Image: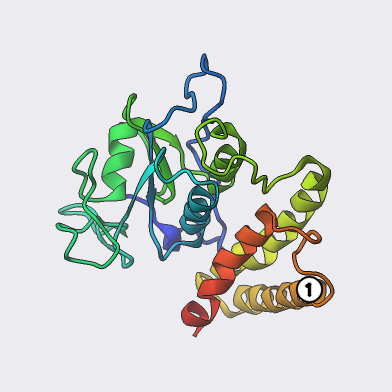
Amino acid sequence: MAKSLVDETTASGAYNRPPSVFRNFVSRDPTSQFPAESERYHLYVSYACPWASRCLAYLKLKGLDKAISFTSVKPIWEKTKEGDEHTGWIFPVSSAEEPGAEPDPLNGAKSIRALYDIASSNYSGRFTVPVLWDKKQKTIVSNESSDILRMFNSEFNDIAENPALDLYPKPLQAKIDEVNEWVYDGINNGVYKCGFAIKQGPYNEAVTKLYQTLDKCEEILSKQRYLCGNTVTEADIRLFVTLIRFDEVMD
């Protein structure tokens, strides 16, 4: 049986996010397995998914719209395969079916699951977005959003319209990494620990940590414009995409 988010709970009833499986890296080195080339890569996203949306934010901010195409799936999970109870991300039949969502323009896939099947015949993990797809090799480069952010930030600068924008500047990297760690634990992944906990104890623990971390962010941002100082960085993007969905989803 194919896995989905709701399957990833421990015996205690707590949500436990598994690591991403596809962790290749696009490089500015033209001799690499996945060189940074214009119109070679495609980003699959869901506007409902903060992990995917932060990659799309980078795509726009760096001015990579013309170099890297993207497609959004439908925002609500549906069955991904006939005769299987698994639910996940689905492409619409036509662009008129769901605002913002479009059919898969590259492979004619019916679901994100189908893309994983194309990339690997023996894959047994979850079928998540974002997916950074290589059109030439017809495979998944990466399904890890944090890696995709770093690729978009630096590896495509030769073809980006905003190459000077650096959201992971060297003087702030240690600070950004530190902030990312506790924001991820308390907020980015924290909302999932709340939403997918199946027992009261783990839920109480997760929701307490979530609001403590939100308070920590509020304290920092009451004194400075951005999480790591006076300039916007990766840390702010990673926080924002979760916060913008917080009230709607948590309610």
Can residue 222 be spotted in the picture? yes
- Give how far across and how far down residue 183 sits, in percent: 70, 62
**Quadrant of the rendered image containing residue 179:** bottom right
- Give how far across and how far down residue 59 sits, in percent: 49, 48
- Give how far across and how far down residue 123 sits, in percent: 37, 37
Residue on which disc 1 sits: 216
What residue is at 33 percent from the left and 40 percent from the top?
116
* Mark 1, secondary structure of its residue: helix
179 above or below 105?
A: below
Total marks shown come to 1
107 above or below 179?
A: above
What residue is at 61 percent from the left and 36 percent from the top?
154
What residue is at 53 percent from the left and 35 percent from the top?
23
Can residue 198 be spotted in the picture? no
Amino acid identity at mark 1? Lys
- Give how far across and how far down residue 151 sits, in percent: 56, 37
Q: Is residue 158 left or right of residue 125?
A: right
Task: Please say which color scheme the image uses.
Answer: rainbow
**Quadrant of the rendered image containing residue 14:** bottom right
Q: Along the line of sight, which residue is nearer the eye, 53 or 186?
A: 53
Q: Along the line of sight, which residue is nearer the eye, 235 or 8?
A: 235
Q: Is residue 34 left or right of residue 223?
A: left
Within 10 Å of the Cα at label 1, are there few (<14), some (14-19), or many (20+) other Cα atoms? Answer: some
Question: Which residue extends farthest bottom?
Answer: 251
